[in-house]
Image (cartoon, helix red, strand yellow):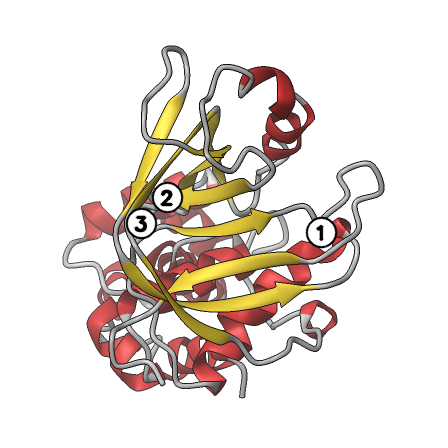
Amino acid sequence: MALIDRILWQIEVHLDRDLDLAELSDRCAVSPYHMSRAFRQSTGLSIMAYVRARRLSVAARTLAGGAEGVIGVALDAGYASHEAFTRAFAARFGVLPSTVRSAGSITDLNLMEPLKMDKKLIVDVAPPEIRTRPAFRVVGPSLRCTFEDNAGILGLWQSFETTTANVESSAPDVAYGVCADADGAGSFRYLAGLAAEARVDGLDAVDLPAARYAVFTHDGHISDLPRTVYTIWNRSLPDHGLDPAGTPDFEVYDRRFDPRTGRGPVEIWIPVMADAA
């Protein structure tokens, strides 16, 4: 079973109980970082935001079905008070829970139904190579984005030659796309740059520590890269018993990749825990 399927199944089974990231990651046999990154990659949501939306949606159905009172529904949804539940419910749906109970209808509510994994996003990915790499720095333009809204990344690459013209690199024909500074809300910083020792005014930098990496290769057109990355995080890493270390991961575009056609091998380097096979 792919990781996202395991996560969604565990959430639905335990939706009416206390559930935190540590317990959920233990049940899914992956680290909290790996689990959270894979879920954000798949859904654009943080795990707990999805859990809250699902619980409120279940509560809405219960209220519309004629629940005797709001407080019991609030407690079942994991809220300690009527007030806290009412605030969260109104923020989610734009109406008070008492209104839904009185109307006996959820027709106009934007409910969060159980998500299902998109099987079309799973592709064949060759087993990774395990490599070590010393610490290095990547310098270039960056932006803050999310897995759901990352259209700005294309703009970074379209202006890459111009923005990195002043970067002194020992390997100017090797470009890096670095994912760093991910947070619990599902956003991360993406930097398109070159390996360099010195920082450059007007550009950002990411310092990557010495690490052990699982290196995957994407051989198709660049437009299919998101499906390869999706498969890596949701199937390949857990299938190979690899646990991401939580430091920045990156893509490598070397002389084999042709930016004019979007074709050629792209390597995806995922830092993994030291006991990786």
Residue at x 37% of width, y 48% of height:
89
Q: Position of residue 64 (x, y in %)?
A: 49, 62
Give me the C-alpha separation between circle 3 and circle 1. Answer: 35 Å
Viewer-closest of 194 and 10: 194
In this picture, residue 88 sits left or right of residue 22: right
- Label 1 or label 2, whichever lies nearer to me, is 1
Viewer-closest of 37 and 84: 37
Lower position in the chain sequence, tag 3 or tag 1: 3
Please indicate, yes or no, whether residue 66 appears anywhere in the rendered image. Answer: no
Dots 3, 1 in contact, CB < 8 A = no
Viewer-closest of 229 and 82: 229
Vertical order, 2 against 38 (above or below) = below
Q: Pointer 2: what residue?
A: 180
- The quarter of the image holding the N terminus is bottom right
In the picture as drawn, the residue positioned furthest to the top comes out as 201
Within-10-Å neighbours for mark 2: few <14, some 14–19, many 20+: many
